[in-house]
Image: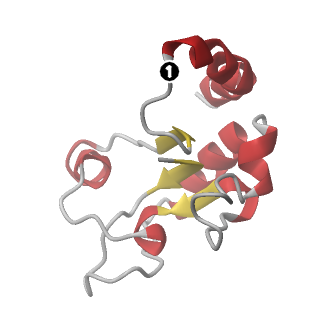
């Protein structure tokens, strides 16, 4: 896990971790930023320093393929085949948080979710 908003493309022709710009890159960046700006820890860009000390996401967002390459991912498939604009929101450094931590996650992401919905 991590704390970041990832946007298409998640794959590139070379199969390596490199920025893979979609035709709607500016729109995806706007959607991703709308979410991350409302989550202070996410927006700072280095949320998981203890686990991934070198990981940095400017403003809490990343192009999927630049982070790591995912061939055949659902986010790209839906965009290319159904014109559905998806982003992937990683909500925390721990993949499976304990139930008692869920209210904290809600508090950290409530404003982000509302801002994300306003983008419609």
The total of numbered circles placed on residues is 1
Residue 73 lies in quadrant? bottom left
Residue 105 lies in quadrant? top right
Would residue 37 be seen by someone viewing this image from the given angle?
A: no
Residue 10 lies in quadrant? bottom left
Q: Is residue 88 left or right of residue 27?
A: left
**62 vs 111: above or below:** below
Q: Residue at coordinates 39% horizontally, 70% vertically from top-left?
A: 68
Point out the image quarter for the C terminus: top right
Percent position of residue 9, x then y: 38, 64
Q: Residues within 10 Å of mark 1 (few under 14, many from 20)?
A: few
Helix, strand, or loop for circle 1?
Answer: loop
**20 vs 83: above or below:** below
Nearest the camera: 43 or 83?
43
Q: Residue at coordinates 33% horizontally, 83% vertically from top-left?
A: 16
Q: Residue at coordinates 72% horizontally, 26% vertically from top-left?
A: 108
Q: Is residue 59 left or right of residue 28?
A: right
Q: Which residue is mark 1?
A: 98
Q: Is residue 81 left or right of residue 50?
A: left
Q: Residue at coordinates 67% horizontally, 38% vertically from top-left?
A: 35
**26 vs 106: above or below:** below
Percent position of residue 44, x then y: 80, 54
Nearest the camera: 61 or 9?
61
Percent position of residue 59, x then y: 75, 57
**115 vs 15: above or below:** above
């Amino acid at each position: 896990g991590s704390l970041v908003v990832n946007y298409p493309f998640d794959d590139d022709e070379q199969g390596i971790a490199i920025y893979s710009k979609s035709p709607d890159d500016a729109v995806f960046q706007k959607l991703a930023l709308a979410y991350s700006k409302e989550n202070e820890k996410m927006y700072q860009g280095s949320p998981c320093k203890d686990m991934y000390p070198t990981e940095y996401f400017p403003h809490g967002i990343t192009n999927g393929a630049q982070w790591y390459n995912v061939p055949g991912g659902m986010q790209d498939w839906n965009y290319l085949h159904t014109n559905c604009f998806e982003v992937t929101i990683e909500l925390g450094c721990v993949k499976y948080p304990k139930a008692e931590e869920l209210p904290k996650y809600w508090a950290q992401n409530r404003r982000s979710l509302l801002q994300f919905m306003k983008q419609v």
